[in-house]
Amino acid sequence: MGDISEQLNQLTQKYEQLEIQWKKECESVQKKDYLINQLRLELEDKNKLIATLTSEIDSLNIYIDDSISEKKQQTSKLNELDKKYQKVKDEYNKLKQKLIDRDLHIQEQEKEYKLLNQQVQSETENLIKTYENKIQQLEEEKDQLKQRSQLKEQTIKYESYKKWFILSVVFQPLIFGLAKFLRKKK
């Protein structure tokens, strides 16, 4: 009878130790849940940032489209100027002096157009580079977020499997000991 009460005391002590360990594991799981929630919040913030940046990119797209439209209008104006220039050239023999004045005027307009065209082209190229850089930056941030999220999920899964393994190793002898004890009692 002394053996049984001693075994019962040992089992009770083991049970209390397991209960303490179980509470610690529960606290650990709660901390990890808290960390997961923090990561989710951080991910949501990053998603909001991505949405904001997407909006900015859309604005840049509109600006680029407007710039392209302006360039087309300027090309159309150049074509009109070329037509005027041809008319002036046809009238050259009759109105030589007027043609010289107009020719100078047209040359000035062409210079302005070329300057404008160069400026628009330079601005368009700069906008395209900025747009491409922002897209690349967003994609890199998105990939980094995905990698961090996957790493956290893998760590959490490993910890869960580890806990269940430890619990099964600890409870197996306890259950068999209890079963043996109950068989002896019968």
Image (cartoon, grey):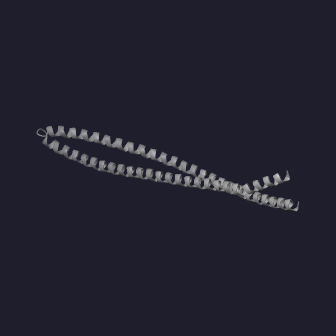
Residue that appears at 67% across and 54% down: 164
Q: Residue furthest right?
A: 1
* x and y percentages locating residue 50 in the rendered image: 51, 49
Residue that appears at 16% across and 45% down: 100
Residue that appears at 47% across and 51% down: 139
Residue 103 found in image quarter: top left
* x and y percentages locating residue 133 in the rendered image: 42, 53
**Res. 38 visible in picture:** no
Residue that appears at 82% across and 52% down: 183
- Residue nearer the viewer, 171 or 27: 171
160 lies left or right of 86: right
Q: Residue furthest left?
A: 93
* x and y percentages locating residue 114 in the rendered image: 27, 48
138 lies left or right of 105: right
* x and y percentages locating residue 137 in the rendered image: 46, 53
- Residue nearer the viewer, 138 or 101: 138
On screen, residue 139 above or below 99: below
**Res. 78 visible in picture:** yes
62 lies left or right of 27: left
- Residue nearer the viewer, 83 or 160: 160
- Residue nearer the viewer, 80 or 43: 43
Instruction: Look at the image and tell me in which quarter the N terminus lies.
Output: bottom right
175 lies left or right of 110: right
